Amino acid sequence: MSKDNLHRYLFENADVRGELVQLEKSYQEILSAHTYPAQIQELLGELMAATSLLTATLKFSGDISVQLQGDGPVSLAVINGNNLQQLRGVARWDGELAQGADLQQLFGKGHMVITLTPTKGERYQGVVALDKDSLAACLEEYFTQSEQLPTKISLFANGKQAAGMLLQILPSEADHNAEFEHLEQLTATVKAEELFDLEAEEVLHRLYHQEEVRLFDPIEVTFSCTCSRERSASAIRTVSKAEIDAIIAEQGKIEMGCEYCNTTYHFDSIDVETIFNNTQAPETKQ
């Protein structure tokens, strides 16, 4: 059974579209960089599924960031990705997290920032409060504010697999609210176990067996970190050489770590000289 795919579908007799995403390997790769408590594992899974669904609704080429911030025990959770469904993510928290804590209890007073950076065109940023019990409910509010399109989102994660569904009315002059409400009620019956264990086609058949559904080819979702030794070298070059030399003299080397994939890049005095001479430092990665 294929995992880590986003599936888009349309209803032939209603101006409503849907998306279904199932994640396993890519989700595990995001979790593997850190030892997260169960609540963070589930949160990142839901956020990863949500970002995949959100990216698929956008007709643009470029990058996306969905970031949750707050003053509670969890201060940050973010998934970054692009229109190719290449995602990475990380979270920060402090102390013990209460079992069964909802979104507001985890983040306290917080907000969600969705940033779109097209390859061509202007950058867009939307902000919505984390004032609902679930991430799905906050995302539905985002769509209400930003696109004024009725949208239903379901998100699930258990530390091993993550999944989500999105149902949305297509822009139209006709009133399709009744059709949407009917399909929303059907979609709301989906269970986490179905999304985790069944093929997407089987899930859709169970939910909409009396509807005409057109299912498009799946899009693979992957974990992909954009860090590199070259990017780290570029960051070093933004600091004065005197300051870099002082660090080398004190510590013998400079270490730069990627928070997303936990890769560490090491630079010694020879590397630093090479960097400031604007040539590529030799590759050292661990």
Image (spheres, helix red, strand yellow):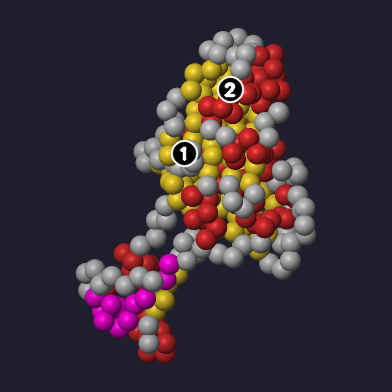
Residue flagged by tag 1: what amino acid is it? Answer: Ser
- Is residue 285 visible in the rendered structure shown here? yes
Residue flagged by tag 2: what amino acid is it? Answer: His
Give whichever of 161, 227 is nearer the camera.
161
Disc number for residue 205: 2
Q: Is 170 inside the magenta-drawn segment?
A: no
Q: Closer to the N terminus: mark 1 or mark 2?
A: 1
Which residue in the protein does label 1 denote? 2
**Above or below 118: residue 92:** below
Q: How far apart in space, not on screen, are marks 1 and 2 (Cα)?
A: 17 Å
Quarter of the figure with the C terminus: bottom left
Q: Residue at x 64, y 28 (%)?
A: 151
Q: Residue at x 41, y 84 (%)?
A: 247
Contact between marks 1 and 2 (CB within 8 A): the answer is: no
The reply, left or right, for residue 14 in relation to residue 84 is right
Label 2: few (<14), some (14–19) or many (≥20) C-alpha neighbours in 10 Å: few
The reply, left or right, for residue 251 in relation to residue 186 is left
Q: Position of residue 65 (x, y in %)?
A: 51, 47
At mark 1, the secondary structure is: loop
Q: Position of residue 7 (x, y in %)?
A: 49, 31
Give whichever of 219, 57 is nearer the camera.
219
Q: Position of residue 23 (x, y in %)?
A: 53, 44
Quadrant assignment, res 36: bottom right
Q: Residue at x 56, y 27 (%)?
A: 202
- Is residue 146 visible in the rendered structure shown here? no
Q: How many marks?
A: 2
Q: Which residues are magenta?
A: 263-274
At mark 2, the secondary structure is: helix
